Image: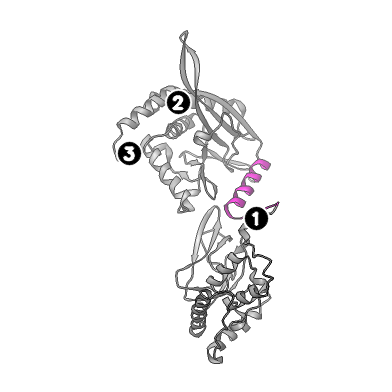
């Protein structure tokens, strides 16, 4: 396990891209590991054949720990290439007429035997060795490679071994694909980003007494302004959602409530109040919730906020976001967009002390100056660390945001 970054002592194995017996080339990705919600691909430093994997998905591995062994012997690599060709040829033959595995000379197989003897000296059992084509065929047929005795060099499983197993099976018993199996219970191991999220949420709820405050905002005026700005924007400017307006309102309210833009070290008993506002923006990805950070949001205009959110959101979703872009937030905004619901109870992104939750916009009939009119409303559901934030301060902070959103011209007078 290489040194991934300063201060990183361990990383979690989240996905292996190789198996024992696979041939690889230099710079091919071997494994994905994750630390502090950033996923890193580890490439192979050499050409060779995978002979041993030292960790399973979900294992936490310390920097410097051996996690993979690669056979770089040229003769061994040649054997794997030859075996792969033979396996592909055997795959094309009918199952009813299995062919014999071609004999190999001792001089060709000897280097592999020597390598396997060295690996066998370790305490870890090795997984069945087979070419990728053999593994794929076994999966289609529902065959567990652990149940197959390999007849290839050093017990390597080849297509002939699968053919022999199929011939031995009763013809009345159809081969059932794994995809056809429908177990009553599916066991899903919590690993990678999902485990990181689970641990952080658990720690946040266990250690922080949350206080949630909900207020409704009339967003009719800001929605009209947003539509006008989008209609007149230049091609180089991003399309505006309501989020950049919320961002401006938060950063412009923070100076009157510096206790909100802070991080609480509860072990040291110290609250660090920050002058710069580094806004965490919660982003849902296929791998789970991530919180990239808009640095120095208090120095940005509405177009810069929108562009940076779009860039970071895309980076989070395509897994190119960096550890630096996921670190250092001082207050967080979370939103589920159109699925935001009416009310939510956001979980604080520790060690921060406040999180602002944006709910969906709804049109309501209301009386305005004695006449019935259609207005657009949205709730802010925000949570605060009650150890350091009093209820009155939380309410005044949200009321300051409400004032700016309901009179959006004020956002552009700072």
Whole-percent x and y of residue 388? 62, 35
User: Would residue 234 appear left or right of 297 to someone viewing this image?
Assistant: left
Most prominent secondary structure in the magenta stretch?
helix
Residue at coordinates 45% horizontally, 54% vertically from top-left? 320
Residue 171 is inside the magenta segment: no
The quarter of the picture where residue 409 lies is top left
Q: What residue is pinned by disc 1?
A: 189
Q: Quadrant of the C terminus?
A: top left
Q: CA distance from mark 3 to mark 2?
A: 22 Å
Q: What residue is pinned by disc 2?
A: 405
Boundaries of the magenta span: 184-207
| Res 103 visible | yes
SS state under label 1: loop
Q: Residue furthest right?
A: 184
User: Would residue 379 appear left or right of 412 to someone viewing this image?
Assistant: right
Q: What residue is pinned by disc 3?
A: 237
The quarter of the picture where residue 164 lies is bottom right
Disc 1 crowd, CA 10 A, few/some/many (<14, 14-19, 20+): few
């Amino acid at each position: 396990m290489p040194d991934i970054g300063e201060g990183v002592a361990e990383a979690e194995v989240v996905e292996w891209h190789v198996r024992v017996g696979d041939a690889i080339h230099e710079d091919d990705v071997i494994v994905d590991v994750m630390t502090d919600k950033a996923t890193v691909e580890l490439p192979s430093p050499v050409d060779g054949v995978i002979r041993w994997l030292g960790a399973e998905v979900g294992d936490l591995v310390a920097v410097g720990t051996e996690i993979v062994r690669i056979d770089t012997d040229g003769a061994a690599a040649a054997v794997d290439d030859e075996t792969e060709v033979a396996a592909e040829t055997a795959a094309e033959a009918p199952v009813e007429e299995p062919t014999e595995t071609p004999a190999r000379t001792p001089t060709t197989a000897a280097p592999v035997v020597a390598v396997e003897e060295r690996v066998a000296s370790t305490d870890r059992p090795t997984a069945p060795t087979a070419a990728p084509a053999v593994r794929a065929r076994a999966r289609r047929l529902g065959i567990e490679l652990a149940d197959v005795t390999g007849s290839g060099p050093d017990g390597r499983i080849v297509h002939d071994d699968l053919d022999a197993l199929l011939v031995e099976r009763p013809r009345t018993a159809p081969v059932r694909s794994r995809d056809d199996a429908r177990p009553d219970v599916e066991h899903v191991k919590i690993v990678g980003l999902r485990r990181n999220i689970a641990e952080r949420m658990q720690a946040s709820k266990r250690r922080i007494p949350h206080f949630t405050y909900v207020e409704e905002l009339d967003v009719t005026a800001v929605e009209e302004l947003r539509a006008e700005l989008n209609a007149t924007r230049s091609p180089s400017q991003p399309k505006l959602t309501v989020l950049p307006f919320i961002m401006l309102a938060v950063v412009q309210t923070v100076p009157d409530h510096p206790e909100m833009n802070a991080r609480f070290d509860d072990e040291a008993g110290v609250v660090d109040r920050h002058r710069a506002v580094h806004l965490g923006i919660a982003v849902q990805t296929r791998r789970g919730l991530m919180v990239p950070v808009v640095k120095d949001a208090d120095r940005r205009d509405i177009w810069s906020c929108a562009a940076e959110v779009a860039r970071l959101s895309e980076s989070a979703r395509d897994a190119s976001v960096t550890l630096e872009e996921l670190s250092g937030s001082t207050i967080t905004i979370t939103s589920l967009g159109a699925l935001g619901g009416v009310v939510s109870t956001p979980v604080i992104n520790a060690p921060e002390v406040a999180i602002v939750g944006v709910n969906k916009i709804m049109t309501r009939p209301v009386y305005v100056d004695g006449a019935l009119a259609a207005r657009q409303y949205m709730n802010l559901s925000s949570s605060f660390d009650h150890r350091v934030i009093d209820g009155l301060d939380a309410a005044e902070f949200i009321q300051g945001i409400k004032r700016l959103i309901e009179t959006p011209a004020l956002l552009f007078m700072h």
